[in-house]
Image: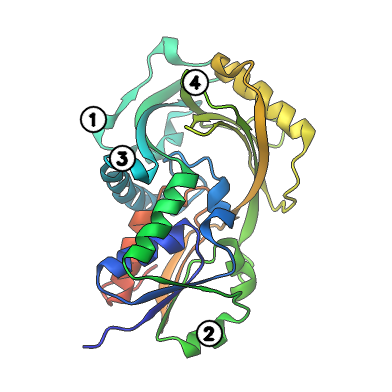
C-alpha cells in the first residue's frame, strides 16, 4: 500500500517533533510554515520538563512520560541541548502534583521540611529534563533535514483549501489554529520572562502555585548555559507581547525570595510569549486532516508522546479523542 505524502503546518516543537517521528517511519514529510523554529513561541519557552496548563490530565501524563524517556536518551548526546538536572518543585497542595504519575519512581522524591520555602507546605525533587531551546530547536531542524524532510516557507491562509490539495495534512499551528479553524475555545496565555546572565551556581526551582490577587503571577528559576530564566506570568486572554517594567520588577522580586543565588546577576533580556491555551489539547483525525494543538504550557513536555499519537492516527490505529 502506497504511503501518503504528509504535510505539517507549523515549525515549532510540536511540528518538528511530529515530522521527525514520521520521517523515521519512512514517510515523506514537508513542513509548511511562515516562521522557522527560532521565530516561534517554542523559542522563548523556559522549557523545563513539566506538564503545565495542559489537559486532559491522564493523557497528558501518558504523553509526558513518553517524552521524559525520550529526553533521557537525548541527554546522552551533547549536541541536543538536553540535560537532566535536579529540580525543586514547591507545592501548597499535594493534589496539585498530579504530574507525579509521569515520572519514574527512581527520579522523584518528597522534599524534606528544610527544603521548603515559606509559602510551600510540600514538594518534590525531580530529576527533570532541561531543554536549552536555542540548541534543541536547531538539533530538531538539522535532524528533520538529515532525515529528508522539506520545509516550505509559506503562510497558510485557508486550511480547508490546503487539505484538499494535500494527501494528508497535520495541523501543528499552535495558537494560529484559532484563526485557521475558527476555534473559539483557544486563547492566548501571556507569559513574560526575564533572562539573567548565566551562572552555574543557580539551582532550578519552580513554585507550583500562583501569586497575586488575580493568580496571574508565577515564580520559577531555570538555569541554562546561555542564561538564567526567571518567570513569570500566566495571563489568560492577554495578547500584548511588549514587556512591562513593573512586571519585570515583580518577577525578579519573587524569584529572589525563592532563590537567593540570583541576586546581583545582571539582566540580559526580557521576553514575552503567548502560550496556546485550550480547555483540552486537541489530537484527532478527521478524514485527511489530523490536529495536534492546544498544548498550553506543556508543548515540549508532551512533544514526543503527542508525535507518536499522531503516528497512530496516520496509520489508522487510533481515532483520537
Q: Which residue is mark 1?
A: 106
In terms of sequence position, does the residue under pointer 1 or pointer 2 come before the other?
A: 1
Give the quadrant of residue 141. bottom left
Distance CA(mark 4)–CA(mark 3): 20 Å
Quadrant that contains the N terminus: bottom left
Look at the picture and state if 264 lies above or below 15: above
Q: Classify 10 Å Cα crowding around label 3: few (below 14), some (14-19), many (20 and above).
A: some
| CA distance for labels 2 and 3 | 37 Å
Frontmost of labels 4 and 2 is: 4
Point out residue 250 in the picture as x, y percentages from the top left corner.
71, 27
Cβ atoms at labels 1 and 4 below 8 Å apart: no
Residue sitting nearer the eye, 135 or 167 = 135
Check disc 4 and report its element: helix, strand or loop.
loop
Res 108 quadrant in image: top left
Q: Which residue is mark 3?
A: 75
What residue sits right under mark 4 in the picture?
202
User: How far apart are labels 4 and 2 at the CA level?
Assistant: 48 Å
Q: Which residue is mark 2?
A: 162
Amino acid at each position: 500500500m502506497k504511503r501518503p505524502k504528509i504535510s505539517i503546518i507549523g515549525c515549532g516543537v510540536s511540528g518538528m517533533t511530529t515530522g521527525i517521528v514520521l520521517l523515521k517511519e519512512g514517510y515523506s514529510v514537508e513542513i509548511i510554515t511562515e516562521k522557522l523554529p527560532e521565530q516561534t513561541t517554542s523559542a522563548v519557552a523556559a522549557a523545563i520538563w513539566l506538564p503545565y496548563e495542559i489537559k486532559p490530565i491522564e493523557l497528558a501524563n501518558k504523553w509526558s512520560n513518553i517524552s521524559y524517556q525520550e529526553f533521557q536518551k537525548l541527554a546522552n548526546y551533547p549536541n541536543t541541548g538536553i540535560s537532566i538536572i535536579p529540580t525543586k518543585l514547591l507545592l501548597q497542595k499535594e493534589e496539585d502534583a498530579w504530574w507525579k504519575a509521569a515520572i519514574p519512581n527512581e527520579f522523584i522524591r518528597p522534599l524534606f521540611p528544610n527544603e521548603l520555602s515559606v509559602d510551600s507546605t510540600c514538594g518534590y525533587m525531580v530529576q527533570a529534563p532541561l531543554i536549552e531551546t536555542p540548541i534543541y530547536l536547531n538539533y530538531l531542524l538539522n535532524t528533520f533535514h538529515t532525515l529528508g524532510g522539506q520545509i516550505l516557507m509559506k503562510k497558510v491562509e485557508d486550511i480547508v483549501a490546503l487539505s484538499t490539495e494535500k494527501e494528508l495534512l497535520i495541523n501543528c499551528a499552535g495558537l494560529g489554529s484559532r484563526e485557521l479553524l475558527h476555534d473559539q475555545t483557544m486563547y492566548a496565555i501571556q507569559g513574560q520572562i526575564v533572562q539573567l546572565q548565566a551562572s552555574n551556581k543557580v539551582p532550578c526551582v519552580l513554585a507550583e502555585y500562583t501569586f497575586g490577587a488575580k493568580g496571574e503571577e508565577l515564580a520559577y528559576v531555570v538555569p541554562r548555559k546561555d542564561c538564567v530564566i526567571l518567570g513569570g506570568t500566566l495571563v489568560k486572554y492577554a495578547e500584548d507581547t511588549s514587556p512591562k517594567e513593573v512586571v519585570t520588577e515583580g518577577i525578579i522580586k519573587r524569584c529572589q525570595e525563592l532563590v537567593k543565588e540570583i541576586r546581583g546577576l545582571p539582566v540580559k533580556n526580557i521576553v514575552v510569549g503567548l502560550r496556546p491555551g485550550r480547555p483540552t489539547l486537541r489530537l484527532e483525525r478527521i478524514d485527511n486532516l489530523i490536529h495536534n494543538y492546544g498544548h498550553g504550557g506543556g508543548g515540549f513536555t508532551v512533544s514526543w508522546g503527542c508525535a507518536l499519537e499522531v503516528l497512530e492516527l496516520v496509520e489508522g490505529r487510533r481515532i483520537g479523542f
